[in-house]
Each structure stands twice: as structure tokens, then as C-alpha cells.
Image (spheres, helix red, strand yellow):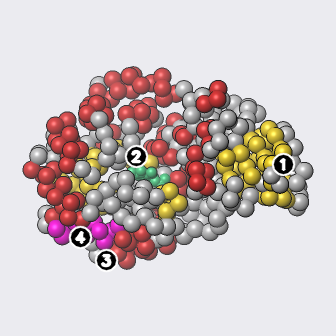
Amino acid sequence: MGAQRAVQAHEGALTWPYPSSGRPSTSPRLELDLAVVGDAYRTFTRAFPQIEPAYAVKANPHPEVLSLLAGLGASVDLASVGELDACLLAGVDPRRMSWGNPVKKPSDVRAAVAAGVTRFTTDSAADVDLLAREAPGAAVTVRLAVDDDGSATPFAGKFGVPPDEAAALLRRADEAGLRAHGLGFHPGSQQTDPSSWRRGIAACRRAAAVFGGPVAELNLGGGFPTVHAAGPVPGLQDIAAAVDAELDGWRPHLVAEPGRVLVADAGVLVAEVVLVTERAGRRWVYLDVGRYQGLAETEAEMIVYRLRCPGHPPDAELGPVVLAGPTCDGDDVLYRRADVRLPVDLVPGDVVEFLGAGAYTSSYASVGFNGLPPLPTFTVRPPTPERTPD
Ligand SMILES: Cc1ncc(COP(=O)(O)O)c(C=O)c1O
């Protein structure tokens, strides 16, 4: 009953950014291949058979992604009431939900509890006290701060506490009538150094030793990297080996919160050239998509996407460009420093595709900056049925 109330309260906001069907030629658009999402999930669970995967909804909250992953058995990691409602609408069992955002309002916790969520991540005394008031008896996981060197989009100290403080928060939770349940960390998104997970686990072990009581759960966060223009990234097997080595026989219930690794490869962001011109000796290419229609991760050129121009032959002559978005903002420039090369005969109307763009694109698009609509998503293939291994 509580779940129903929460869904109704937010239903309009949830369905709005997602067109329901068809494959229009609107530009820009995100084309999302659900079969690739399913394959990515199966690859993840094969690499980490002992781990409960809790999909980080923020990476791509499209309803079909949520129902596909829920159907395959994934849990979910929530950051807001909007994500909670999206998951309820997609049929995710609240027992498979955990609230991973350590920054919450009382109304967030109330909505989560009303829906049946019982697992929360925290990293401050004030938040532990809030949970004790609004979610008595809930299971609490304390997030540790880890050195996120190697991450393309580091948290830079925004979240987490050192081991001593984590132990104190577990104690505080216990004394306040919560369940001091687990420890965890997030090594920073697009993390290319497997030893980052080792550092996180080592910090959790220190916290567990200081706490002294049982620690039932260890949350390894997200961060699992995907391929972009920067070239190869460590495979999931490399990260799994690092995790195993550092666990060294420690066997709490393991959870991970993969986001981008489950959806990035499924997405192609299709855009169109609006203007090509020379400025100060450089060729500027302006697209109909930019920082505000879903390419937020180009900020500081953190993520440099692989690009493809389907209207040009694979051996077309390429030349360097500055790649810019369509809005009036000076910071709506995608790449000035990165070595981005596009066909020298590119003209307005030509299509430019961003590969590996299924994560953190549609969910980042603004509601209408410069009057431009949010990035629509079109699913292009149904999920493949469960395949038996060769
Ligand atoms: C708490 C939490 N869990 C999981 C994720 C997913 O991370 P990724 O997409 O790098 O796997 C994020 C991303 O910011 C996060 O904040």
C-alpha cells in the first residue's frame, strides 16, 4: 500500500523523459540496445558470481532497462525518491533495493520506508540520527572514503569517512536502534586501477577491526570502467582478481553497485552537425547535442567518447576539430584539448554518433536549456533470451 502511494505521487515525472515507442529520426537521440544491456549484466555476474549486483539506477533509469535488469535478478541502488518510484513502477521488489545516497531528506527516508526499503548507506552522524528517527531497525552500511586516483570522475572527498570514524558510526547506529550491518566504499566512477578496490577493502577491514562486532555486508561500490577513446581499460576479471586477493578469506555478503558498465556499451547517441567554421586557425564543428542534452560527462573532457560518422567511408580523410554543443553557453564545448578528428568534408546535416554512450547521458540532459528538449531514448532491440553457455 505504501509502495502504491509513493508511485502515484511521482508517476508523471517519471514517464515524461522517455518516448514510448517507434524509431524516429529525431536528432539528437539515444539509441539503446537492450540485448547489450542483458549481455553486460550476464558478463558482470559471471565475473563476480558471489556478488549481489545492485544496478546504480542513475546511470540510465529508462523503464525498460529497469524491468530487464530486475527480470534478470538484479538488485538496485537508489539515490532519490524519483529512482525509488521508477523501480517500483518497473516491478523491482523493495527487498532488492538499497538507498546508496548518504545525503537524504527526512521525506526521502519516509518514502523509502513506506515502500518497504530496509537498507541504507550513510557516512555522517547526522544521517545516522535521521535514519534512527525515520527508519528504526533498518540495516545501515557505512561508506568509507577511499583514494580515488585512477577514476575519470573522482568524488574528491565528497563522500565517506576514514576507518575509525566508520567504526564509530556503526556503533552509533547500533546504539540508536539501527542494524549495524555493513561497510562499503565507491572507488570513483570509470575507475581504471583495480588496486583501488584493494585499497577500499583494506580500509573496510581496518574499520571492521576497530568496530569489533560482526560486519555482515561489504559493498564494493561501482566504478567498473567502460571503453572510450582513451583506449583499453582493465577487464572485470582483473578487478575480480584484485578483490579476491584483498578479501583473502574474509567472507561477508558482497554487494556491488555497477552503473555504467551495465549500460554504456548499449547506447549510441546520434547527433547531427549544425555548423562547421574556422576560428583562430582551428576547425570548429557545432553539433545539435552538447553538455546540456546529455553529454555532461564531457565536462573537463573527463570522458572522451569514440565517434563515428556513418555517412562517410571508414577511410575518409580526417582532420582535427574543436567539438562544440549548440547552446549559447561558453562552457558548452565538448572537446578543445582532446585529439578529436572528423572527416575533413563534414557538412551541416551529417550524422555524428557517440559510441558507448548509454550511461549518464539521458539522465543528465537538462529539461529545456536554450529551449532544447531532453534527450529522447529509443530502444532498438528487445533483450535476447537467456542463452546457454557454449
Ligand atoms: C553510490 C553510487 N553507487 C554506484 C554508482 C555507479 O557508479 P558507476 O557508474 O561508476 O559504476 C555511483 C555513481 O556515481 C554512486 O554514486
- Earlier in the chain: of badge 2 and badge 1, it is 2
Tag 3: amino acid: Asp
Residue type beneath disc 4: Arg
Q: Which residue is mark 4?
A: 206
Q: CA distance from mark 2 to mark 1?
A: 47 Å
Tell me, yes or no, if residue 110 can be seen here. yes
Residue at 61 percent of width and 38 percent of height: 292
Quarter of the picture containing the C terminus is bottom right
Looking at the picture, which amino acid does disc 1 mark?
Answer: Glu
Q: Residue furthest left?
A: 175
Mark 4 or 2: the one toward you: 4
Q: Quadrant of the N terminus?
A: top left
Over which residues does the magenta segment extend?
Answer: 200-210
Label 4: how many Cα within 10 Å (few below 14, some 14–19, many 20+): some
Q: Is mark 1 within 8 Å of ligand 1?
A: no
- Image: 1 above or below 361: above
Count neighbours of disc 1 (C-alpha within 10 A) and say few if under 14, some if 14 to 19, many if 20 or more. few
Placement of 268 over or under 366, stated as above or below? below
Disc 1 vs disc 4: which is toward the camera?
Answer: 1
Q: Which label was assigned to residue 76?
A: 2
Task: Report which residue position mark 3 lands on.
Answer: 248
What is the distance, in whole Å, between disc 4 and disc 2 at their CAs? 27 Å
